[in-house]
Amino acid sequence: MKLATALSKSILWRGFYFVSVMLLNILVARHFQSEGSGQMYYVINLLAFTLILISFCLEAPMGYYLSQQKINETQLALLSVGWTVLIMLPGWFIIRTLPVPKEGLLQLAGFHFSATSFLAGNLLISFFVSLFYAKMDFVLPNLLLVAVNLLLIGLVPNNEWVSGFLSNERYVQLYFFGFFMQGFLLMLAFLFRYFKWSALKAVPAALIKPFFSFAFIAVVTNSMTFLMYRIDYWFVNKYCGDDELGNYIQACKLAQLFFIVPSILAGVVFPMTASGRKEEMNQKMQLLSRGLILFYSVACMFLLVTGAWLFPFVFGPTFQKMYLPFILLAPAILSYSVIHLLAAYYSGKKVLRVNLTGNILALTVIVLGDWLVIPVYGIAGAAMVSSVGYLCYMSYMLLAHAKEYNSRFVDFLLFRKSDAQLLIGLLKEKFSTAKTDEV
């Protein structure tokens, strides 16, 4: 599949999914307000970190080896299902021993059930989305994810009709069960489309060690990446009130919406780089980075002007404190746009050392900064520290790239007049491909 076609399909269909996530987030925030939604998302944050550890980040080597066609779809599908069952059978008994939150929605909404649904569902989501994307199949998985999100959007108990048969506590249970529904549907769809009994055979012994070595490095890197952009939640929870926690998490979630396009592009950069198209992706990755920086700079300026009244209007009056931390997160938004593309590129080359070192640098800066700054400056301090950490991470990765390719920072950061012509060329490639497909 040509780059322009892959990018357009990925942006379109993953874009639908992320729009549904955004709408669901807004409705949940408006209904449960800053304190209630803050509690939910804080617990989700804890479970998401647990997910990285129990998944062993197998989705990374799965996508890599399937892109290179060294391990087939049937083998990896069985590994996905088998690993999920292997982890969640004992995991269920461990979860049942965990203390239930003493107060809040999750205390009333079946914490053990919600945690189990979240972890089991997201294991399946992580594995099978990676397999679908390695096959350059972006339509079906996102249709299934969006379908469940639309169901959850329609059932938010924010009106008399829905609240008449679905309480807040039951909705929270349904919200967490939605992750399991998504994972289960993805599993069925992938097995139906790609599973072949004739392809069922043992994985070559020579690939087992590098497969799990790749996964181990991905666990370390992804854990540090996760902590890099979410460890501040723990510090804010410790030093600030529930209302500030809810506002800060929502400001971070809004900032993370800007990570959607880089993550979509990275979902194409990684398999294409892994398949051997390194030089092509290196050049076009710089073009995409410059375009993102320009577009996001304009978007951040717009929110700088309008955010003070726009955020409470969209999320509700309890979110008046999210404006300042969001504005202070703007440098992090611009930095991460570059980081995500470079991280996918180096992962596709199996050069994970650069990602790991950058993570360690940023995480060190953020942890020390949060410890010193948040007790004094609160959620504004948390946002400033995050931006400094992201800038350090981006600078390190750009220096590593410059050392290898003799590139310059401006190759990734400053949009050029010639870039418009290159982007038009990508669009023409897309339309010419579409016409060829029709013939």
Image (spheres, grey):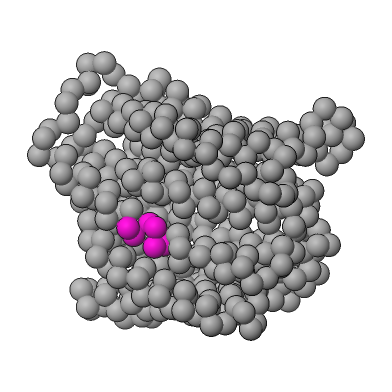
Q: Residue 138: percent from the left, percent from the top?
A: 45, 39
Residue name at image x 62 percent, y 53 percent: 41
Which SS type dominates the magenta stretch? helix
The N terminus lies in which quarter of the figure?
A: top left
Residue 181, compared with residue 239, is above or below; it is: above
* Res. 161 image quadrant: top right
Q: Which residue sits at x=58%, y=45%? A: 99
Image spot of residue 222 (x, y percent): 38, 57
The residue at the far top in this view is 197
> Residue at the left extreme?
206
Asked whether residue 187 is in view, the answer is yes
Q: In front: 54, or 159?
A: 54
**In the figure, residue 351 lies in which quadrant?**
bottom left
Q: Is residue 387 visible?
A: no
Magenta-colored span: 220-225
Magenta segment: does it hold 19? no
